[in-house]
Amino acid sequence: MRLPTRTREPIVASDPCCPQSLYGPALAMIPFDNTYARLPERFFTRQSPARVPAPALIRLNPALAATLRIDGDWLTSAEGEAMLAGNTTPDGAEPIAQAYAGHQFGGFVPQLGDGRAILIGEVVDPSGARYDLQLKGSGRTPFSRGGDGKAALGPVLREYVISEAMAALGVPTTRALAAVATGELVPRQEGPLAGGVFTRVAASHIRVGTFQYFLARNDIDGIRLLADHVIARHYPQASEMANPHLALLESVVAAQADLIAQWMSVGFIHGVMNTDNMAISGETIDYGPCAFMDVFHPRCVFSSIDRGARYAYGNQPDIGLWNLTRFAETLLPLLSDDVETAKGQAEAVLSGYPARFGVQATARFRAKLGLPAEAPAELIQECLDLLAAEEADFTLFFRQLTRVAAGEASETIATMCRSSEAFNTWFAAWRHAADPAAHLADMRAANPILIPRNHRVEHAIQRGYAGDFAPFHRLVEALAAPYAEQSDYADLEAPPRPEEVVQETFCGT
Ligand code: AMP
Ligand code: MG
């Protein structure tokens, strides 16, 4: 395959159409301010992205670009496109592949690392928040093991749609800055597929597995450097505490409890909650085989690789604690010189997780049901039991309940349950306990109208492989306002017809 002849020449300076004065200092198209690349060399390897034959921008997120103070017009230019595909490295970038380890489905792997992703640098937004810019699917790194370091277009489109939907739903998440097609084919099980590169923006890509990487090497200095980097970057208030590393653990436990409560409240199943896919920042990361449930069931699983249903919807809170326990283990050497003291401190923090999760999840489900504080919390579990027994669509049930709260008749919601007796019993209890008039705004803010339904995502991907990105763009645009009534997108509310149901999702590696 012929590669473009352009090498790493300056992006703008030599172009007479783009005088430097228009853009400020030469080449500084992205105001990089890198800190991870300042950590010791054993934290990463320096690795440039691979070149691709024919970059073509599929979608850019101009609002996110503006937040990051990156010129959106430049990103859509040929030079920006080349950068987003990994063909040029902008001034100030220091491309690295980060080292990490992780428990995958319960088994420890001492070295994973960025096998198909390259962190090109960090930028700081006007509020002072720092973000990583990462190219995903940009070629092999020393951590690629048997993989090719590439991404097929499907997983790129999938991550774009779902991560941006999560952001619009209000769930902490990594973001999508851009998706490009590379013009090359990548070999996958199902045959050669069109390739893509995804630009991911994250508060950081530091994972529980990053800490585990250093513990596995008994590199306590490494753990300390990483912990202090994380405190400065994500949890600066921890540095004011008597034991900053214990405060770090508290902060991460709280962030993850809150995050998983949010997942539960919107019916999100992460699908691959390995410790390398749990971000220390508290953002949702790694949109591999994730899915939003249609029909509710606590044992709902989509991931083709999750044979034991370890990461089923209802297991997510417990897995969160399991992963956080692995994180706590890495911090023990920093907590106290005395092992038993350190263990006691860590256990005390971890023991607060179930209550924190419970409070957060209950508050979110109370809002979904329009329940006042004094209403019995049992109604929540009874509702979920009803949905499971009646095989009702999770999102649509709460959508219809919100309509009932707004004064509509209950016929439509009643038809969502096969047993009218079961529905009537629960509904009467809800009518008795809920105060919909007072909590209608809460219900509207807690019950999305649109979620990225699997069959819609799948359709957008399949059309994308055929060169038609219209369904992908439409999905992204609709999901930007998931709580709003949008008559133009009413068709996207519907659950799948039986023949459209997606049974399995894939991590796309
Ligand atoms: P994930 O399932 O996405 O969390 O990835 C687990 C590990 O496999 C990470 O170390 C990835 O970098 C690596 N990996 C996944 N896909 C590829 C690929 N296509 N090429 C190289 N490494 C990969
Ligand atoms: Mg991962």
Image (cartoon, grey):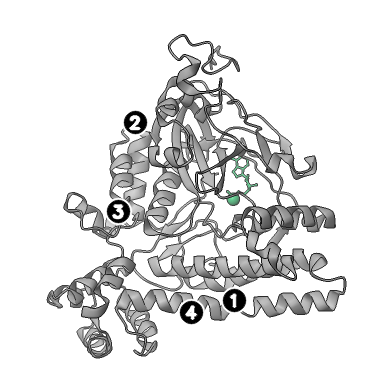
The percent coordinates of residue 195 (x first, y second) are 48, 32
Few, some or many residues within 10 Å of mark 4 (<14, 14–19, 20+): some
Q: CA distance from mark 3 to mark 2?
A: 26 Å
Amino acid bearing label 4: Val
Rounded to the nearest angstrom, the CA distance separating label 4 from label 3 is: 27 Å
Q: Quadrant of residue 494?
A: bottom left
Nearer the N terminus, badge 4 or badge 1?
A: 1
Q: CB of residue at label 3: within 8 Å of ligand 2?
A: no
Q: Earlier in the sequence, mark 3 or mark 2?
A: 2
- At a point 39% along the width and 41% down the height, the residue shown is 63
Q: Which residue is mark 1?
A: 353
Give whichever of discs 4 and 2 has the lower sequence position.
4
Q: Is residue 59 left or right of residue 55?
A: left
Please tell me which of labels 1 and 3 falls first in the chain: 1
Furthest-right residue in this view: 337
Q: Secondary structure at mark 2?
A: loop
Task: Tell me the CA gap for discs 1 and 3.
Answer: 31 Å
Q: Earlier in the sequence, mark 4 or mark 3?
A: 4
Left or right for 347, reference 133: right
Residue that numbered label 3 is attached to? 481
Locate residue 92, reporting x and y percent. 62, 29
Asked whether the beta carbons under mark 4 and mark 2 sit within 8 Å of each other, the answer is: no
Confirm or reject: label 4 Cβ below 8 Å from ligand 2. Answer: no
**Pointer 4 with pointer 3, Cβ within 8 A:** no
Please name whichever residue, 169 or 442, is drawn nearer the observer in this view of the structure. 442
